[in-house]
Image: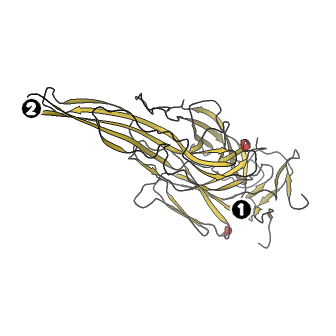
Amino acid sequence: MSYGFSAINTSGQVIISDEMENLHFYGKATLSGNDGGDYEDFPGYSGANDTLDGRIIFTYSIVLEPPTGGGGIFVPASPLVFIKPTDYTRWHALLTQSVAADGKTWTFDVITSGLSQSNPPELFCFVNANSTSGATSDHGLIVWKADGYTRTFDSRYRPLAVTAGGSIAPATCPSDDGCPGVSTGHPWNYATLDHDFRSSSQYNSQATNGATYTNLMFSAPSLAQAVYKRQVEGYKYSSSSWGGGQSHWSTAIWWVMYRNTFRIRNGYFDAGWTDYAAGYSFSSNHEGGGWFGGGGGGYSSGTMPYSAKVINQGSNAFMIADSTGFD
Amino acid sequence: MSHGLEIFDEHGHLVFSTLDITWMQIDQFDVAANASASHDYPEVAGMTIITQLQMVNAPPASQEAYAPEVIVSGTTVSVAPYTSKTSERVIIMVLAQD
């Protein structure tokens, strides 16, 4: 460029420019509630491998007020959200982000592993400079675009500095016990789950650097989703002393839907999975004839949203930052 | 440090300096379900561009919630449903680093 402003860091990277916008801290989103938590086990089933990791969904909101005075044109912006865990042993991810009809009230749903309503994460919201408002300080550095009214940098609002970034995808199969499937040849009415659907050991990792990890926060929306089921089919044939006989069939299905979640631990950023929903169904029937007429029965808790698979498996961009000073 | 730029807030706290690293926000846009979009950012030629996709809505209860495909080619970011797939509504954040 032949005029304007740019600042270059010690790595030779442009960090302030009159052509590109820095992200600045707007504020923390307010926790407004949670869904009570669920899926610490299979609903309606009691037996082997019943335990799941469980999850709770916290809801937050923040209002991005347009700036008043000082010139410029306000353009409503989507905040870039960083999650700072309060409990770093839990997995978290931003599930949804939406704005109300007023164009400024944002709502976020965050999934957290486990059922505890304690220690919800904090959400730090960042916007471009021109969406910031409310500062009263009359000193610092403001950089404007060539249009003369769009701020690209405003030191009155703490600018975002990152400690790491890149792309990351979760492990291919969410279940600790591998990807389950369908098996036949079991005894009639067999309904014992032989698969561990928990997911806490299935993740990919990237190294983080430097900072004390309990100060770190991350920006990484949840994209990958998965549904897996374990299905066992039972059968028997019963003969009568008068000849002839009856076939008996049974089917037991356990399914879990997972969402991609993330964890910061000492030296690493992990992309893994947390169960989002789960269900169990059982059906048993027998054909007519023999001693008994035909008939059957069953039980079902919930429906698989789609056939077993992983979707949106590709990498999504993430950033890590030190939360110190952003209050 | 003996050279570079340091910026302080009104309380005298260092808030930014040439020791810092950051990603600059180039753009953000909303892509409706099953829609496509393409944007070019010549001002960041030579920089690394990354994108973040954020789902707007909770996944439906009875079908897949596919994300659209995002392709970064040079300074162009293109978004479209995968072939023969639907796609959910998403917010795309476009970030660049020198």
What residue is disc 1 on?
A20
Q: Quadrant of residue A166?
A: bottom right
Q: Residue furthest top?
A: A291
Which numbered circle lies on residue A243? Answer: 2
Q: Nearer the viewer, residue A77 or B48?
A: B48
| Residue at the image point whose x is 80% and y is 49% from the top | A156
The answer to whether residue A79 is seen in the rendering is no
Viewer-closest of A266 and A59: A266
Q: Judge whether A141 appears above or below A273 on screen.
A: below
Q: Earlier in the sequence, mark 2 or mark 1?
A: 1
Q: Would residue A181 be found to the left or right of residue B36 on screen?
A: left
Q: Could you classify mark 1 by the number of other residues whose Cα lies within 10 Å: few (under 14), some (14-19), or many (20 or more)?
A: many
Amino acid type at circle 1 is Met
Mark 1, chain letter? A
Q: Measuring from the top left, give residue A101's x and y in whole percent.
A: 56, 43
Q: Secondary structure at mark 2?
A: loop
Does residue A140 appear to the left or right of A13 in the view shown? right
Image quadrant holding the C terminus of chain A, namely top right
Q: Quadrant of the N terminus of chain A?
A: bottom right
Image point 71% across, 58% down: which residue?
A: A21
What chain does badge 2 belong to?
A
Q: Are marks 2 and 1 on the same chain?
A: yes
How does the figure colour the protein chain or chains? secondary structure
User: How far across and how far down the image is residue B52, in percent?
Assistant: 59, 55
Secondary structure of residue under mark 1: loop
**Mark pair 2, 1: CA separation:** 85 Å
Residue A201 lies left or right of residue B2; in this view the side is: left
